[in-house]
Amino acid sequence: MRTASLWRTGPLILALLFGGCAADVPIETGPPDGWVADASQLRWWQADVDTTGLFRSLDTLGDLGATGAYLENVQIEQMTNDLARRKLAVLVKKNLLPLFRNEPQVVDSLFDRYVFPRMESARIQGDVTPEIEKYKAEGYRIIARHFRSPRPLTKMGTDIPVAIPDSLQKAEFNGSAFIQVAIDTLGQPVAMELLYGVHPVLDRIAMRATTEMRWQPAYLLGTHRSEAIPSWARFKVRFNSNLTP
């Protein structure tokens, strides 16, 4: 199973408790009506959706196509002042990855337009850690004026009931299913990919429940008009057989 690096900020964390389930009630683990899956069961999508561009890696700046990613391996000391500032911008972007992952092209464009010009006076000699932290904070604040990330409106296990098969309730599971979801302008999931799983059956239960999740969609904020735009979200569904309701 393919894995992906974890993110440090911004994930939706859902704890699913192993509750009772009637043995004679079958639990659906496949895609619901209107959804299809590939042979590996790692990718699910709505049957009537064009999936072009929906399944993409969002792990690194290179994956995202963020401006300046080609500078990542160049040392600041080897650069002219202008290139050093661009290198510093790449380091700041790497610290803003959770935000970039929501809509890479939009966020990268906003960063280059509104944040990078403010780095003209950035200190680029010696330890630049304070500068990275400074412009990371400014980046979040400035981009938030123009872009709103998707926000979950439903909670799994509360708004969306989740049943665990009796055969797994006594098993010792303690892990998470990590899922990446493409969200449309109505806040509905249209495609999803399992990035890292805990158990084949539990993974499919988590993905099926995710088809019922709803978000406040991402918005591009304007002075006179705001526009909902497609986006992505990443989150983990945590299973712990030692927890009790």
Image (cartoon, rainbow, N blue to C red):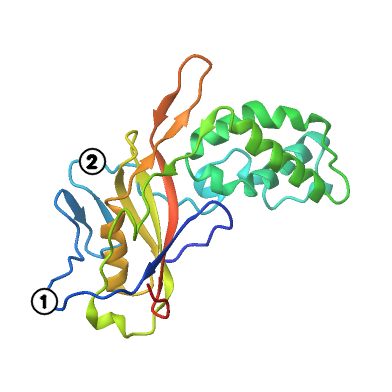
Q: Which residue in the rendered view is the most extreme toward the top? A: 224
**Please, what secondary structure does the residue beneath circle 1 have?**
loop
Mark 2 is on which residue type? Val
Instruction: Determine the CA span between mark 1 and mark 2.
Output: 35 Å
Closest to the observer: 115 or 219?
219
According to the picture, the residue beneath numbered tag 1 turns out to be 24
Closest to the observer: 87 or 240?
240
Mark 1 is on which residue type? Asp
Q: x, y (%) of residue 79? A: 80, 42
According to the picture, the residue beneath numbered tag 2 turns out to be 49
* Residue under the image location 32 percent in, 67 percent down: 203
Tell me if residue 161 comes above or below residue 23 in the rendering: above
**Please, what secondary structure does the residue beneath circle 2 have?**
loop
Closest to the observer: 196 or 210?
210
Answer whether residue 123 is visible to the viewer in this image.
yes
Q: In this view, does 67 lie to the left or right of 44?
A: right
Answer whether residue 1 is visible to the viewer in this image.
no
Q: In this view, does 140 lie to the left or right of 125?
A: left
Residue 90: name its quadrant: top right
* Residue under the image location 47 percent in, 62 percent down: 4
* Residue under the image location 37 percent in, 53 percent down: 155
Q: Earlier in the sequence, mark 1 or mark 2?
A: 1
Tell me if residue 4 comes above or below residue 149 in the rendering: below
Q: Quadrant of the N terminus?
A: bottom left
**Which numbered marker is on residue 101?**
none
- Circles 1 and 2: CB distance less than 8 Å? no
Q: Circle 1: is it few (<14), some (14-19), or many (20+) Cα within 10 Å?
A: few
Q: Circle 2: is it few (<14), some (14-19), or many (20+) Cα within 10 Å?
A: few
